[in-house]
Amino acid sequence: MPLTESQRLEYLQVLGIDSYFPRIQMPGAPVSELVMPAPVIQEELAADNAPVHEHAPALKEAPPPRQPDRPAPSQRNSAATPAPVAAEKPRAREEIRLQLLCIRAGTDLAILNALPYMGPGQLGPRHHALLTSLLGALGIDSENIEVESKPFTWPMVTGLHVDNSPRAAATALLAYLQQKQSDWSFGKLLVMGEKAMHPVFTAVDDEEESSARPSIGQGKWKLSQTRSLDELLQHPELKKEAWKCIRTLLP
């Protein structure tokens, strides 16, 4: 069982064991046996009891000379070697996706209408009714309207080594129209969906590709471009603008 401090001192006193030894004899205190200090403590006591001279300044050990600061290894490397300049990333080209439906109207007109890429590949009832109304205003009867069963889609195939650039898309579409022109012998071409065709037949930053890219106006037909049937149905206010463009196809 541990003892309290008072019990411990009382036991030591009964046993005749001194529990306190002063370092120096204090004035007015009972005479007691002094503790024998260690050599280091004796030197400190001698230094404390040494006389102090007021006019003698204490000598201080001079500090070691300061060494010039050396940069860290990472700083030395960065100072000696200039930071590499980040290479400019090539600009990503816009992905071209097309679904175009070719329509024969009468004996001298072909229509290329842009469809939503993820939508159906044929005209809906409302689209067909709007087309019939526009062509009727041109004097073309609905019986003389022939719609292709399969639209032109781009890209035709996908893969790592397949050229799906705008130049390739323009070349493929122009070849498709030339084949239709050979089959139908039309002299006028109405492109409905100029917004969808814009990235295919419009110059880009690459001048070399732009100069080598074919134009939709290179065919043996009179060209006119306006909004798609889907755009005219969604924004009826555009019909007036479209009709002005379509009227240029009148004889």
Image: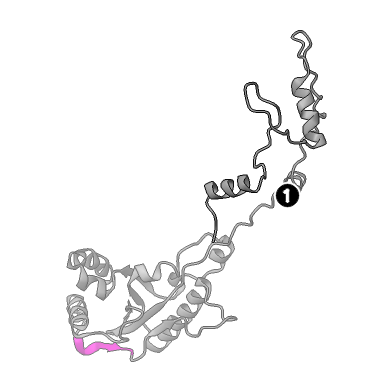
Q: Residue at x 33, y 91 (%)?
A: 149
Say left or right for 32 vs 90: right
Q: Position of residue 67 (x, y in %)?
A: 81, 33
Identify the image quadrant of residue 3. bottom right
For the question of whether residue 251 can be seen, the reply is: no
Say left or right for 33 vs 147: right
Question: Which of these two is toward me, 77 or 173?
Answer: 77
Compared with 56, 135 (above or below) is below
Q: Residue at x 32, y 78 (%)?
A: 116
Say left or right for 16 vs 193: right
Q: Quadrant of the C terminus?
A: bottom left
Q: Which residue is mark 1?
A: 74
Identify the image quadrant of residue 185. bottom left
Q: Position of residue 206 (x, y in %)?
A: 56, 61
Q: Secondary structure at mark 1?
A: helix
Q: Residue at x 46, y 78 (%)?
A: 174
Q: Position of residue 139 (x, y in %)?
A: 19, 79
Identify the image quadrant of residue 64. top right
Q: Give the extent of the magenta segment.
A: 142-148
Residue 6 painted magenta: no
Question: Which of these two is toward me, 100 or 240?
Answer: 100
